[in-house]
Image (cartoon, rainbow, N blue to C red):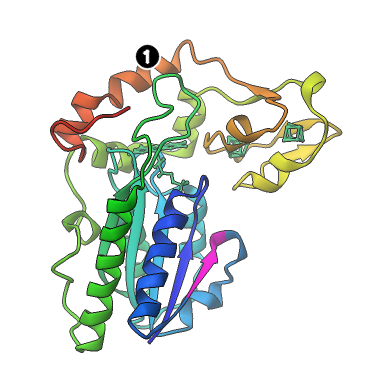
Amino acid sequence: MDVTLICFSQTGNTHQVATAMAAAFREAGHLARIIPLKEASPEDATRGDLLGVGSPCFSSQAPTLIKEYLRALPPLDDQLAFVFATSSGAPGRVLYDLTRLLRGKGAHVLGGFLARGQVHHPAPHMTGHSLGHPDAEDLTHARRFAVAVAEHVSAGRSGPLPESRPDALAPGRGLYDLMGLVSSDIMLRLLLPEPKPEPGKCDQCQWCVRQCPMDNIALQPHPVLGDRCIRCYRCLTGCPQKAFGADWRFADPFLLLLYNAASMRWFGDLEPGEQVY
Ligand SMILES: Cc1cc2nc3c(=O)[nH]c(=O)nc-3n(C[C@H](O)[C@H](O)[C@H](O)COP(=O)(O)O)c2cc1C
Ligand code: SF4
Ligand code: SF4
């Protein structure tokens, strides 16, 4: 079997899961290649016998850039597929977003896998959530899931994968599922602070221009943001000169209200006793 894994990963967590899955497919005698989203062409999704699509969860949903990629795909004509994601404990609709868009193109989605991933978000109450994930156990689960998918397909079974998370195949109805459904990029731009470049600190290295997933930063000669920001804060957390800042006075209490351990346990998928930090 020829497996294509198309994956967006901003800080490497989802890529670790993709790497573990690819290793498991290869150990089982299959071909597997990982294509980072920015390098993936629409045709890449149509090649091979099995397609895996992976993404981090941003704001309880799949990030705009992977949704845009999936919407622009050609028909997938019953292509067998699965989805995977990483999140900190409030995954909301991330898996189902991927499934829904793949199904919209005619793909046959067998199921989905989710692992915990450490948060690199600059809001004081968010940063460091799910510290150390994905860990060795998470990656073992990812490998097992890939083996289960491979066996399912090799046996000619086309029904839903028993090992799949239910929220990969049907939308959940919890608080975070609802938030993922209603929150749009426009709403995020209203509620969350814009990263503000401090020109005096910038040495024009271009890192943020290359890393912004939405190609939303231009150097003129210092960084200027366009109107496609999804508030992923890659520019702010990654700039080598720490040349971006943001005012968290209003947004941080709001984020704490929504993404705290108790809420993520009641309405997300944080296990009882599991530490947020
Ligand atoms: C801007 C942003 C928003 C996020 N929103 C959520 C969220 O709503 N729910 C959640 O469980 N995790 C959320 N996270 C955590 C990420 O999903 C998690 O850290 C993920 O593993 C990152 O994957 P990556 O390293 O592949 O980019 C968010 C992280 C960032 C940076
Ligand atoms: S990454 Fe930082 S230093 Fe480099 S161009 Fe962007 S703002 Fe300037
Ligand atoms: S400008 Fe910064 S916060 Fe906005 S999308 Fe680009 S990297 Fe993310």
Give the quadrant of ligand 1: top left
Q: Image quadrant of residue 257? A: top left
In the image, the segment drawn in magenta is 33-37
Residue flagged by tag 1: what amino acid is it? Pro
Quadrant where the image shows the C terminus: top left
Q: Main secondary structure of the magenta part?
A: strand
Asked if residue 264 lies in the magenta stretch, the reply is no
Q: Which residue is mark 1?
A: 253
Image quarter in which the N terminus is found:
bottom left
**Residue at x 25%, y 42% (from the top left corner):** 177
Helix, strand or loop for disc 1: helix
Residue 29: image x %, image y %?
37, 86
**Extreme residue toward the right, this view:** 221
Q: Few, some or many C-alpha atoms within 10 Å of disc 1 (few <14, some 14-19, many ≥20)? A: some
Indicate whether 2 appears above or below 219: below
Q: Which of these two is toward me, 54 or 215?
A: 54
Residue 168 x/y as whole percent: 24, 58
Q: Quadrant of residue 178?
A: top left
Q: Say left or right for 161 vs 15.
A: left
Q: Nearer the viewer, residue 277 or 86?
A: 277
Horizontal and vertical percent for residue 79?
36, 81
Of 234 and 230, nearer the camera is: 234
Q: How many marks?
A: 1
Q: Which is nearer the eye, 21 or 36?
A: 21
In the rendered image, residue 151, in percent from the top left (x then y), is placed at 22, 81
Point 37% across, 67% down: residue: 21
